[in-house]
Image (cartoon, rainbow, N blue to C red):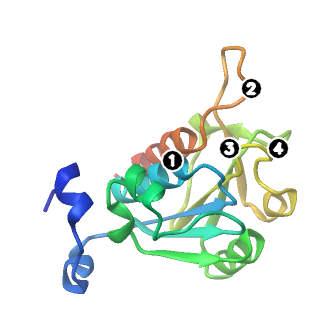
Amino acid sequence: MKLNAKQLRKSVPAQNELKKIKRNPIYLVLDQIIDTYNIGSLFRLADAIAATKMYLCGEMEYPPSSRIHKAAVGTETWVPWEKSESTLETAKKLKKEGIQIIAVEQSSLSVSYSNLKPYFPCAIVVGNETEGIDQKVLDEADLIVELPMFGVNRSFNVWGSAAVVAYKILESLN
């Protein structure tokens, strides 16, 4: 089943419809994302890659939110998600479950996303648009990856970075 934007905005999925979706062993972990447009776009990304689950961590806006809904185009009702008070505790919990933690951040420990060789299941952690990912979360990560920046800007948009890394990870599934 594929729905267009108009259909998605009005859709309310039944539990049996949600269970039919084949999910990939990929999780998204959002660390205090400020911009509701980014949150909604990350829901669209989670749907696009059929993520198992998305964690919204810390102080940020959560669904239901008209601003998130507008950017998510209704995908927030199709993507399994959970609110969490702490990104660090979420990362620790996932790691204990055998999930590889991949942080997307510029760091002296970062490797290029092009060299990314994930194992599954894995979680992509993306950070606050101003502060990035908290250092304690980076310390918990199994791998830190970054995208090369060739212009004057030091960083790429959070949902755009997550998308590049997520699709690189999907290449490893096939």
The residue at which mark 3 appears reads as: 145
Helix, strand or loop under label 1: helix
The residue at which mark 2 appears reads as: 154
Q: Residue 121 or 28: which is nearer the viewer? A: 28
For the residues labelled 3 and 4, say whether their Cβ atoms are less than 8 Å apart: no
Kind of residue at disc 2 = Arg
Kind of residue at disc 3 = Val
Q: Residue 129 or 154: which is nearer the viewer? A: 129
The relative height of residue 92 versus residue 28 in the rendered view (above or below) is below
Residue 116, located in which quarter of the rendered image?
top right
Of callouts 3 and 4, which one flags the residue occurring earlier in the amino acid sequence? 4
Of callouts 4 and 2, which one flags the residue occurring earlier in the amino acid sequence? 4
For the residues labelled 1 and 4, say whether their Cβ atoms are less than 8 Å apart: no
Residue name at image x 65 percent, y 55 percent: 33
Q: Nearer the viewer, mark 2 or mark 3?
A: 2
Left or right, 98 with reference to 22: right
Helix, strand or loop under label 3: strand
Q: Nearer the viewer, mark 1 or mark 4?
A: 1
Q: Nearer the viewer, mark 2 or mark 1?
A: 1
Query: Crowdedness of circle 3 by 10 Å Cα count: few (<14), some, many (20+)?
Result: many
Kind of residue at disc 4 = Leu
Q: How far apart, in angstroms, are the residues tagged by discs 3 and 4?
A: 8 Å
The residue at which mark 1 appears reads as: 37
For the residues labelled 2 and 1, say whether their Cβ atoms are less than 8 Å apart: no
